[in-house]
Image (cartoon, coloured by chain):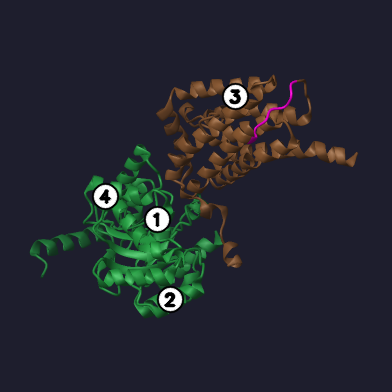
Amino acid sequence: MMSEWRTYSLEDFLLFSPRTYWRLFELHNAEFWPLQIAVFILGVTMLALALRPGQWSGRTVFLILAVMWAWVGWSFLWHRYATINWAIIYVVPIFFVEAFLLIVGGKGRDPGPDRSFPRIAGFLLVLYALFLHPLIAPSSGRPVEAMEIFGMAPDPTAIATLGIILMHASSARVTWLLLPIPLVWCLLSGFTLLALNAWESWLPFGAAGIALTAQIRPRTIRHKV
Amino acid sequence: MSPSRRTVLKGALGSLASIIFPQIPSAQERPFEPPIQKRIPSSGELIPCVGLGTWITFNVGEDAELRNECAAVMEAFFAAGGRVIDSSPMYGSSQSVVGYGLEKLGEHSGVFSADKVWISSADEGPAQIEQSRRYWQVQRFDLLQVHNLVAWESHLNTLFEMKAAGRLGYVGITTSEGRRHDLFERVMRTYPLDFIQITYNIVDRKVESRILPLAEDRGIAVIANRPFQRKALIRRLEGKPLPEWADEIEAGSWAQFILKYIVSHPAITVAIPATTRADHVRENLAAASIPLPDPAMRRRMAEYVQRL
């Protein structure tokens, strides 16, 4: 059986064409317009709250993310992506698990300045997910209507989540509780895009790499010292 | 029935014209000519030797624009004389898109419906088959195959029972990319299969040594999947010139060159290229025409492609 598995390539697991895949985002945005504006405002609010941690903002930031994970899981994965990829049905519950973990385990850090590497890397990831990731579609020749927006599409939602966790999690325990699912999604999405021969595959891979490096590197340095 | 005087005269004038004007129009330029049909050994039924695959190309979900494009591909396919459409529960929404096209075109009677059962639980096989039938919106399937030999013993029992009860035309098994050929051969020798489906094209020729001769011996029809290696073969050959002698078999493109190679094998009943374009469907069906390469030409074709 193992030798049989070796005969499969990444493309063997691909069920749809690039055009069908990219059009999912176009149709999704068209169906829910102008919800994107409200979701974008929520995203910016989330970033602002994470930058200025206060008594009530810690939970609020994770609550916003939890709503986004549940919404994207239900509206995009279940109702749209699963129509062309039956395997996604098994991923939907994982999005709900992440939403649950964000609600029950998401504790924000204490107020006060912090310019450590994980915080800066996290801030840059959130900036990218909110403002730059949506521009990938039009800059790759796809219509503006096909933009992947935080809170509407899974990739920018997962990347922003990685960033917020790095910026805002109160402890390593909270970070490691919340980090695995967005990391796994980034890998899944990266491999899907790789099978589609899309250069964009490096974006979720890169985000996952940055998040992991930012989380592991400071500890390694401390350990060596 | 003896040919009418008009037919004889038309034929004679045609022969005379071909002597005066030796330039032969390509298969695509000629007026409509029905595709070559091949016989299903177990029944003697004739089916066109180029069909339509649906993997990836027909998995377009609920996208209305793309569903209509698929229906247009099917319309071109039927108009060019095609009949065999192959799908599977594994191909996402492809089955329901085929059903949508059949309903839109009113072609339920013209299609030769080939689908698969693909589920590891033997008990759930009949329910999956019924769900597939509903997606296709057909009374019954012409052919059902056990996909990639998943739970093959139980599913074959189900399929033979369905056939015996008149709820199915033919029974088959499939594999792809040369996987599990030993088991595949064993099933071919043990069960009274009507069809097998394997990967076969001008570069993937592993089945020529054992599987295809065995199919001929056992009187099993053969469906050739992945004729273009999911476009990779066409991309590899794009930009390279067809040999001048491709004119001898009236192959006007690499797609036709490859398809003519596949369907000219005596054991092959039908090749099932998949496409999203109506013009490609017409080009594919046009390859199912005389002249087909003889064994010497087939060797020459394979050697030529190997050298590129």
**Chain depicted in brown:** A
Residue at the disc numbered 2: B187
Query: Magenta residues?
Result: A105-111
Residue at the disc numbered 3: A131
Using the numbered discs, state the Cα–Cα distance from disc 3 to disc 1 in whole angstroms: 39 Å
**Residue B42 location (% of width, % of height):** 29, 75
Using the numbered discs, state the Cα–Cα distance from disc 4 to disc 2 in whole angstroms: 33 Å
Q: Which residue is depicted at the point 32% across and 72% down?
A: B160
- Quarter of the figure with the N terminus of chain B: bottom left
What secondary structure prevails in the magenta region? loop
Using the numbered discs, state the Cα–Cα distance from disc 2 to disc 3 in whole angstroms: 57 Å
Q: Quadrant of residue A49?
A: top right
**Residue A4 location (% of width, % of height):** 57, 65
Mark 3 vs mark 1: tell me if same chain: no
Pick whichever of labels 2 and 1 is earlier in the sequence.
Answer: 1
- Asked if residue A155 is among those painted magenta in the image, a careful observer would answer no
**Residue B72 location (% of width, % of height):** 30, 44
The subunit carrying tag 3 is A
Q: In the image, what residue type sits under mark 4?
A: Leu
Q: Quadrant of residue B40?
A: bottom left
